[in-house]
Image (spheres, rainbow, N blue to C red):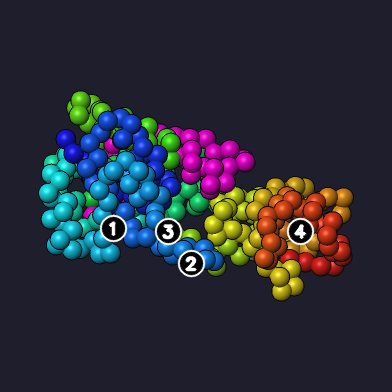
Amino acid sequence: MALIFFGTPLFAVSSLKALLYGKEDVSLVVTRPDRVKGRGHVLSAPPVKELALAHNIKVAQPVKIRDEAFYRELQMVRPEFLIVVAYGRLLPREVLAIPSSGCINVHGSLLPRYRGAAPIQRALINGEHVTGVTTMLMDEGMDTGDILLKAELEVRDDDTSESLSEKLSELGAATLLETLGRIREGGIKRQPQTGGPSYAPPLTKEEGRINWSRSAEELFNFVRGMYPWPSAFCYLTTERIKITKARPCDGAAEAGLIVKASGGELLVGTGKGLLAVEELQPEGKKIMPARAFVAGRKLEEGRERFS
């Protein structure tokens, strides 16, 4: 039977690929409208659209979900399931009622933890050591539906939101295929979500501002969770500096104070411990190792500071 796939970013691509390689009948792909990106203001298609078109699958990009013509387009497919992976919008009751067997969502956390748009980034920022994916039957709430399957994944110290998203994308694709197979075999019992939920609202550019009074361990997690977007940033006098890789180390100094900028090292004081900056991006330049940054600047150790 036919499926309709809702998804937009790179995270959703693995699930769509898995359906296609699994010989599922994906009859329609629904994604967000194309967006203008980059300094050149180029109109760019979502990654899911690019994959769908490469496989000659019809694509819909509704500006509004609550649209009668769009409802009719979905109904004409007569889908068995709607599959939703990081589409970016809540689906109304009228859409959720269309498939004969329900709407399955792949979410990048172990629900009910980290409901919302940025579960991977928020898990890293909060220093989680284990995360995972959940497949659930959707309802009208934000990630509140009954759970079908969960799969856990260890968070490594060198993970960023980029690397962790890639791993969870692949895990989500495999879990989705298992979910579909077990539903059709009658081997899944849906379970209501239990325990206190937590939330993962979308990140904003302003949230990337580093608060040096936080501990070095917290800032280590913050930098990882903010990479590659919006990136953790601070200022050196008036110059905006993005910090893209760092690690905590022992020591003590005033928050934001540059205590070492020599010998290839850049050490900064925090609320607890020191943060060793390993990679950063000065304003208007490419990402560079800290040793290149300190070699090209005459920073006064113990006097200059990041704010």
- 42 horizontally vs 232: left or right: left
Residue 269, can we see it?
yes
Quarter residue 287 falls in = bottom right
**What amino acid is at disc 2?**
His
Residue behind mark 2: 41
Contact check, label 2 and label 3, Cβ < 8 Å? no
Q: Earlier in the sequence, mark 4 or mark 2?
A: 2
Q: Secondary structure at mark 4?
A: strand
**What amino acid is at disc 1?**
Gln
Q: Secondary structure at mark 1?
A: loop
Q: CA distance from mark 3 to mark 4?
A: 41 Å
Quarter in which the C terminus is drawn: bottom right
Residue extent of the magenta highlight: 140-168
Quarter in which the N terminus is drawn: top left
Q: CA distance from mark 4 to mark 2?
A: 39 Å
Disc nearest the viewer among 3 and 4: 3
Residue behind mark 1: 61
Residue behind mark 4: 269
Q: Percent x, y for residue 117?
A: 40, 55
How many residues crowd around disc 4 within 10 Å: few (fewer than 14), some, or many (20 or more)?
many
Work out whether residue 172 or residue 288 is closer to the camera in this orientation and state it: 288
Work out whether residue 259 or residue 77 is closer to the camera in this orientation and state it: 77
Q: Percent x, y for residue 152?
A: 44, 34
Q: CA distance from mark 1 to mark 4?
A: 48 Å
**What amino acid is at disc 4?**
Gly
